[in-house]
Amino acid sequence: MDWNKTKTIFIFTFLLLNGFLIAQLFNHMENREGDVEVEDNLEAQLDYQNIDIETELPNEEVALSVVRSRTMESLPEEAENNYDDADVFSDIEFDSETGELSVWLEEPYEIDEDDAWQERREFIDTYVYDGDSYRFANRDETEINYYANHENRTLIAPRNTHLTVNENEDGAIDSFTQQFVYTDNLAEQSISSAVDAIDTLIEANALTTNSTVTNVEYVYYSALSEEYVSNEVMYAPYYRFVVQEEFENENQRPDVYLVSAVEGEETIREP
């Protein structure tokens, strides 16, 4: 064996490896310096506009994917068992085409107007199958709508809620409709930082002087139109920001914004 030649190859390989590692180190340092510069600039902008961040920002290193939801063609046995109490439920009807279960109560569930939101929440948590997983979406005069979740993150899509609670003319709950869906992860996404999303909100004038960010979390969002009907819906990862303006009344709902967690560019007010 030619040891001189072998030694030369080892030395050359070692130098190449060192060169690669040094290049990676410099690249990491440059990226880190860029991140620090962005954070420093953002902090200066927040101070200048007196914008407070009163919540912990999500960790952008978490793995998030595009999520697909599909309606169930049959009712889960445990859900069916949940509604077999004849003293509470008068009738149930499942639609295999839409995955929707309609449930009617034996007697209307009275709601105290002074504590309506809390009492509706108690009703859902007590009587609706997997009720504590639903989150308020919107309401009209007699219907209150809620979103389901995937891995404890809300699935938000205009006109595509997963639970509708119906009230009669006296404000008592007399029925509800629940849509059953499967959810699964598809392509994993590269997640931008919450700092980038905040910068996007500032550039869009969504975060204004003297405002306060009270909550930031990951959700999944699908921009469905009102006319869109499908048994399969795709959702992308988003940041959900809750913002309290300085002069808002205490009883006024705060502003809510959705910012893409993938590109960090698009700002959408939650419907």
Image (cartoon, rainbow, N blue to C red):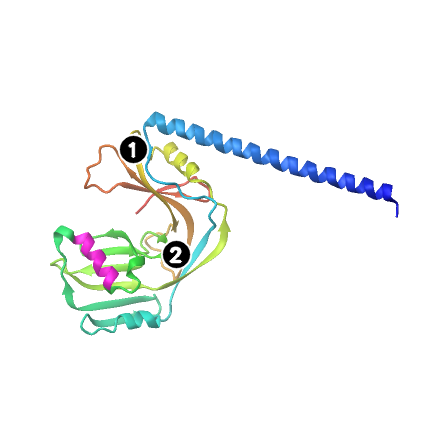
Q: Residue at x 48, y 56 (%)?
A: 186
Residue 63: percent from the left, percent from the top? Answer: 48, 50
Q: Residue at x 40, y 56 (%)?
A: 151
Counting other residues with Cα less than 10 Å from the Cα at mark 2, is it few (<14), some (14-19), or many (20 or more)? some
Closer to us: 192 or 4 = 4
Q: Earlier in the sequence, mark 1 or mark 2?
A: 2
Q: Amino acid at mark 2?
A: His
Q: Residue at x 69, y 37 (%)?
A: 18
Closer to us: 151 or 178 = 151
Closer to us: 223 or 188 = 188
Asked whether residue 95 appears in the rendered view, the answer is: no
Most distant residue in the left direction: 170
Q: Amino acid at mark 1?
A: Ser
Closer to us: 22 or 111 = 22
| Residue picked out by circle 2 | 150
Residue 227: image quadrant is bottom left
Q: Which disc number belongs to residue 211? A: 1
Most distant residue in the right direction: 1
On the rendered structure, is 111 left or right of 176? left
Q: CA distance from mark 1 to mark 2?
A: 30 Å
Q: Secondary structure at mark 2?
A: strand
Q: Residue at x 42, y 37 (%)?
A: 195
Instruction: Find out whether the residues at labels 1 and 2 contact each other: C-beta distance under 8 Å.
Output: no
Residue 251: percent from the left, percent from the top? Answer: 19, 41
Asked whether residue 9 appears in the rendered view, the answer is: yes
Q: Which residues are magenta?
A: 116-126
Residue 122: image quadrant is bottom left
Residue 179: percent from the left, percent from the top? Answer: 32, 63
Counting other residues with Cα less than 10 Å from the Cα at mark 1, is it few (<14), some (14-19), or many (20 or more)? many
